[in-house]
Image (cartoon, rainbow, N blue to C red):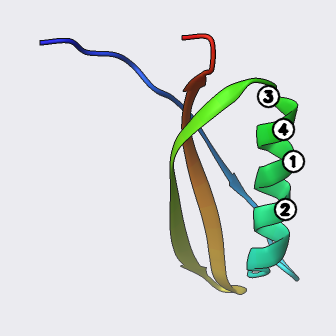
Amino acid sequence: MDSWTIKHFSQANPAGTGQDDVPALLRRVADSIERRGSIQVQDLVMHTEITADGPWPSLTVYFHDAAD
């Protein structure tokens, strides 16, 4: 059976005011993906933590280098 390892990173908005701004989070993650250069995204998973300041969404991006 073949196996392989996938890379990932997670990202959220800064805590506090605006932490629940999903469009801002998506822009932030898109910028991070572009900065990584030539990668192929395999999956995006959104999580939401409930904090004293309200919902705090984050995204985990699973990817591999396009050359792999």
Q: Earlier in the sequence, mark 1 or mark 3?
A: 1
Q: Position of residue 53 (x, y in %)?
A: 72, 86
Per the image, label 3 sits on a secondary structure element best described as loop
Labels 4 and 3 touching (C-beta < 8 A)? yes
| Cα gap from disc 2 to disc 3, whole angstroms | 14 Å
Per the image, label 2 sits on a secondary structure element best described as helix
**Label ID, residue 36:** 3
Graded by Cα atoms within 10 Å as few (under 14), some (14 to 19) or many (20 or more), the crowding at tag 2 reads few
| Cα gap from disc 2 to disc 1, whole angstroms | 6 Å
**How many labels, in total?**
4
Graded by Cα atoms within 10 Å as few (under 14), some (14 to 19) or many (20 or more), the crowding at tag 4 reads few
Residue 46 can be seen, yes or no = yes
Per the image, label 1 sits on a secondary structure element best described as helix
Graded by Cα atoms within 10 Å as few (under 14), some (14 to 19) or many (20 or more), the crowding at tag 3 reads few
Q: Earlier in the sequence, mark 2 or mark 3?
A: 2
Q: Position of residue 33 (x, y in %)?
A: 76, 40
Q: Position of residue 18 (x, y in %)?
A: 86, 81
> Pointer 2: what residue?
27
> Pointer 4: what residue?
34
